[in-house]
Image (cartoon, grey):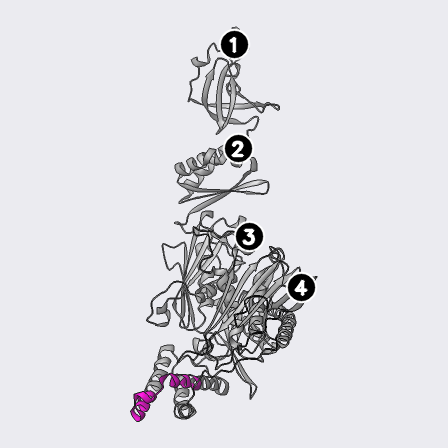
Amino acid sequence: MNNTVLQKTIDLGEGRKVTIETGKVANQADGSVVITMGRTMLLATVVSAKEAKEDVDFMPLTVEYKEKFASFGRFPGGFLKREARPSNYEILIARLVDRALRPLFPEDYHAETFVTINLISADKDIIPDALAGLAASAALSVSDIPFNGPISEARVARIDGHFKINPTFEELEQADMDIMVGANMEHVMMVEGEMSEVSEQEMLEAIKFGHEAIKMQCIAQNELAEEKNVQKREYEHEANDEELRSRVREELYDKIYEAAKNNKGKKERNDALDEIKDAFTDQLIEEKGEDEVNTALIGNYFHEVEKEAVRSLILDEGLRVDGRKYNEIRPIWCEVDYLPAAHGSALFTRGETQSLTTVTLGTKLDEQVIDEVLVQGTEKFVLHYNFPPFSTGDAKPVRGVSRREVGHGNLAHRALKRMVPLEEDNPYAIRVVSDILESNGSSSMATVCAGTLALMDSGIQMKKPVSGIAMGLITDESSGKYAILSDILGDEDHLGDMDFKVTGTEDGITACQMDIKISGLSYEIMNEALQQSKEGRLHILNKMKETLAEPRPDYKPHTPRFEQLRIPKDMIGALIGPGGKIVQQIQEETESTITIESQGDYGVVDVFAENKEQVDAAVRQINKIVEVPEVGKVYTGTIKSIVSFGAFIEIIPGKEGLLHISEIDWKRIESVESVLEEGQEIQVKLIDIDKQTGNLRLSRKALLPKPDKNKQKR
């Protein structure tokens, strides 16, 4: 093995450079590189088995992205104090890399392949995920593993109207567009991101901008592989039977074509295709004997013919398998308030895809805690997506949350989050949960639609409703024919060349996700797909509005109520009390939940309770504590102690003033005890605040009628 250390440097502009280095570390892997930018370093390794396992007819690729807490000098949280299962963030980055790499392995390469990317040094100003795709591709490029790369990924953000590649965390907070682009030298392979209602043309410009930056990164990888004199390994992972392949096509093509054409429903179509395949398999077994028939190969060749037949049906006859036109959307029906006990709920059904989505509103204590290597804090709005096996009629157990569920939930979350009011306009923590009950087509886009309806049903004042659509593409390179399909079915996704999901409001795109399975997709076709998606998206949005056009004016009666107060910053301690005693007492007496946090020059107090009466009671107590005494104001106070010269009266919790004996009554008082007693409530007027000591002077007689002196003389 040649362990010579080689380096290549990529200039990102503005003095920012990225270095690719190979040959120094992890040399027992098939390929390894270290990517360095500033103080950020990513180690990427790739290892692939020498042989494929028997009967494997797909690419068994596993991509892992892991951020080491030591890279930023931090201890992991939790009891064990070590890195555990991947976080959702790490899963999402691994999926981004996987989606860009997977199409570029040879179709007949089936050896188990593992790509591992570790963040080993971190810089607080550099977002490392934008370098993960480059690291993975570079490791493959310097390895002997067959790979039709290189590729790279780049984050494109638009800040103050200008595009920037791989911005800092701080810059990204100001961006109205944040997308990740994956591409090779010639073509874009993958796009995913979120934006603030941008146009289709603006998104296309961002993709092109990212692609130009990626080309430089691909050139550097090619040069590195050339300097290393990389030789790709020989392999033979498929044992084909061309006679069987030919027979499957000759005998079954017409039958498959007719089954795809004449069976509009998913179940009926699948049953018809299974019947054709089973009959053919039984016939072969009868002819040759069971030991001589390779059912796995029959399945592979049957799928090839099915793909050819369905694509021909679409391109030659203009017919989709369910009988729709290219731009036609399946029937849609919606229902809100389906679950009477939820804070908000909606059913969204489009064709054979159905989402039941709920909204739960909680307190600040319910916010999701984020504890990643470079990002800490809380998330006020979360969205979870569940895809149970029964939604596709599969008899399988549920084995925890899959990476696919994490990815689909993230896309829907990004689609909605910029339209969900946060901060002052909404103190609630919001959890949206989409349970997919049926699936044939994009369930993530159904989640966006159902999520919008459920949020509006809950009374959350969304800025604008959001809908989503999945677009597909069928192409024939030899003839140049292509068909852009709106609202694709599962079959059209599996057998097609593109899966393009777009979400947005009436005024622009809020999120997108695109995976391209072929090379040679032009920007013209991409633009046409975007324009067609807009028509479909608006059609779906109008259908949603027929059910619920705008957010409900108020929350459900059983939704916890809230009030938000701002108090002087120096009053936070008084409200909390020693050891939290005061705020805990208020919560106990009013059956409420109170959260307090400092924001700038003031404190923000959120009060939550089951009903408005409990909230009002808590607010009254808080106001008493944080109230600033005001000269001339009348207070109902409690006598705390009596002395010879007067009484000390608590007019506000924690604030006492002196009621001097001379201010008790207009007439002379010989003894304070003869008029007042401890624990008694009386009304007093604040007549003065000592500027030096802050002591309060109270008067009771100021509230009593002044005696008439003439009457006293008579």
Residue assigned mark 1: 711
- Which quadrant would residue 437 be assigned to in this image? bottom left
Front position among marks 3 and 2: 3
Local SS, label 4 = strand
Q: CA distance from mark 1 to mark 3?
A: 85 Å
Secondary structure mostly seen in magenta is: helix
| Residue at image coords 42%, 22% | 680
Query: Foreground residue, 53 or 352?
Result: 53
Front position among marks 2 and 1: 2
Local SS, label 1 = helix
Query: Foreground residue, 580 or 80?
Result: 80
Magenta residues (range)? 280-305
Tell me which amino acid carries mark 3.
Gly
Residue 125's spot in the image, x, y percent? 62, 56
Q: CA distance from mark 1 to mark 4?
A: 96 Å
Local SS, label 2 = loop
Residue 455's spot in the image, x, y percent? 46, 57
Residue assigned mark 4: 17
Q: Earlier in the sequence, mark 4 or mark 2?
A: 4
Residue assigned mark 2: 627
